Image (cartoon, grey):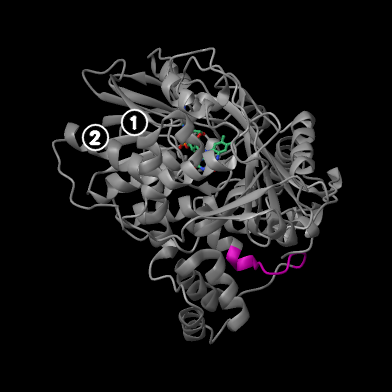
Amino acid sequence: MTDFDSTLDRDEAWAVRPAFLELENHHSEVLVIGGGINGISIMRDLSLQGVKVTLIDAGDLISGASAASSHMIHGGIRYLENGEFRLVRESVQERNDLLRTAPHVVKPLRTAVPIFSLTSGILKAPLNFLNHGKSKTKAKRSERGALLIAIGLVIYESFSRVNGVMDRFSFYGAKRAAREIPSLHPKVKYMATYFDASVHEPERLALDLVSDALATGNARVLTYAKAVGTKDGGVIIEDALSHQTLVTFADVVVNASGPLTDITNSSLGRQTQFMGGTKGSHIVVDHPQLYSELAGRELFFENKDGRIVLIYPVKGRVLIGTTDIFVESGAEVVCTEEEVDYFFNLVEHILPGIHMERSQIVFRFSGIRPLPKQDAAQPGFVSRDYKIDQGILPNSQKTPLFSVVGGKWTTFRALGEHVSNLALAELSKVRSVSTLGLEIGGGKNFPTTEKATEDWVSARASVLGLTRTRALLSRYGTAAEKLIKYLELNGDTELENLKGYSQQEIAFLAIEENAVRLDDFLLRRTTLAFSGLLNQERVQELAKVAAAALGWSAEQIQSEITRAWDILQFKHGVEKTGGRVAI
Ligand SMILES: Cc1cc2nc3c(=O)[nH]c(=O)nc-3n(C[C@H](O)[C@H](O)[C@H](O)COP(=O)(O)OP(=O)(O)OC[C@H]3O[C@@H](n4cnc5c(N)ncnc54)[C@H](O)[C@@H]3O)c2cc1C
């Protein structure tokens, strides 16, 4: 939660929540501060080992850096240049694992790299490995040529050969590249194609991990609850809605507050300087020509300034990103007009046949990468690897306080396992369950062939019909089964202003998925905002439905709508008059 969020809450009066009061003098074995992907992963791993774990977040789940990702589940071929072989090896293996354990949301991504020359950059790349982390004055990278990229791909693929779930990379020439992507720059000489993966709905993946953790009976989750200090060996928590405070206790505390890790440590009374984040922004555009020319593939290439950027189709739109700008860890960041210009220029650089207009932007987002503080010359040189620091919780006898520094979406499972092992050692407990290969939420028994999908759908379509059942499977994976049963009992009344969603579906999300505020529904329980589907009427209708499920008063409905629009307009550039046709 940021300063912007707290100003939004200034005039509101929320009752104290029973779930908050339950934490008073409560004793957990582990308290996790931060409900981003890393905190959630740690909670899931610990709960599976039988550890009693409590997770709190100052805002909603997945509302920090985890909401700002490029949606890539990737080994990070680019990090080879920085010599980060450990990270790349682990990431590729985690990517392959996620393709198996979360096939409902993590899909293979054909990635095309357009290249302007054969040999460029070949001499400077080894210098980048050698200088990594040592020099502030690293040579500016020259453009990456075809040979350098081929070497990178050979190393990259060697990391995953054991598990080998992806097709091999290939190269082809200018003619075929131009045939496949007519708007491509005529000076592109080669096209390398390899496979990575993407997560179309990161929030859904995280919410599934939360459901898995809650299902063990060992986890509890409270959002809008901020760690603000320490007292008598415990952690002081402030309810971000009612502003009440209380003290809760744990044998082990984990600070997983992403880019805010130092700030949280400071509130707890420990001064650290672990973080040195960079800002990254994206835009989402509704551009049918660009979408169709991409034909399902990601374009991953070097922009004029040497940054590796990406353009790829997701949920019927095209995602374009990203920037990499040094900022203070606690800074409030939004995607600026200069960054939009940068994105338009990068599209023009590689696809001069594509014309872009600002009216085609349906959503913008920005976040701070939780990177370790480093003395790097350029943001791209900062290590993307993670580390875990161990300290002592201030005002306690000896309560261990672990701080998570870094950690990407791709590696959340491995990071969760790592931190969980450290906590288990402190608790003198042993690991009983491995999360490697363990199916996640709606990925359990997910049908991956056309025939299996149709069998799954027809076996459950007797009440809702084939089309609706198919849509729910695609939205929630096999976790849709529980929702289908709920809808069979409670009805499935389609929203008046938004086809494809029902009143009861929204109520179900409120009950089952810890949604508290209206923006939780719009931004993180659904992809309505990301896909550019929101407008005034739709937000109003969704607010009414959420209010019925969560018992909001008429004033609360109004203030939730006002707050939601403040966030949508200020942070995401969404217009009240927007609202594209549902895809
Ligand atoms: C622009 C960008 C692009 C990226 N692209 C990719 C990508 O394509 N693939 C990939 O694998 N990774 C990507 N990443 C990296 C990845 O998104 C992040 O590293 C990851 O999401 C960090 O998760 P986290 O849980 O550590 O932090 P966060 O998601 O920031 O979670 C921390 C949580 O802690 C909470 N919090 C803070 N202070 C307190 C407190 N005092 N009390 C309680 N709660 C608190 C916050 O509200 C927040 O929800 C990208 C990141 C950015 C910014």
Q: Quadrant of the N terminus?
A: top right
Towards the viewer: 261 or 494: 261
- Which residue sits at x=72%, y=69%? 499
The magenta stretch is: 496-505
Residue that numbered label 2 is attached to: 423
The amino acid marked with disc number 1 is: Val
Q: Quadrant of residue 419?
A: top left
- Disc 2 on helix, strand or loop? helix
| Mark 2 touches mark 1? (CB < 8 Å) | yes
In the depicted structure, whether residue 227 falls above or below residue 510:
above
Relative to residue 179, is residue 217 drawn left or right?
left
Q: Looking at mark 2, is its residue's CB closer than 8 Å to ligand 1?
A: no
Picture coordinates of residue 159 (x, y %)? 36, 47
Q: Residues within 10 Å of mark 1 (few under 14, many from 20)?
A: many
Majority SS type along the magenta span: loop
The amino acid marked with disc number 2 is: Ala
- Residue 254 is marked as 1
Picture coordinates of residue 22 (x, y %)? 37, 40
- Disc 1 on helix, strand or loop? strand
- Which residue sits at x=51%, y=74%? 484
Towards the viewer: 20 or 81: 81
Distance (Cα) linking label 2 and label 1? 9 Å
Indicate whether residue 363 is drawn in magenta. Answer: no
Relative to residue 361, is residue 106 drawn left or right?
left
Picture coordinates of residue 116 (x, y %)? 68, 41
Indicate whether residue 503 is drawn in magenta. Answer: yes
In the depicted structure, whether residue 487 falls above or below residue 460:
above
Picture coordinates of residue 246 (x, y %)? 40, 28
Towards the viewer: 357 or 334: 357
Relative to residue 37, is residue 183 drawn left or right?
right
Q: Quadrant of the C terminus?
A: bottom right
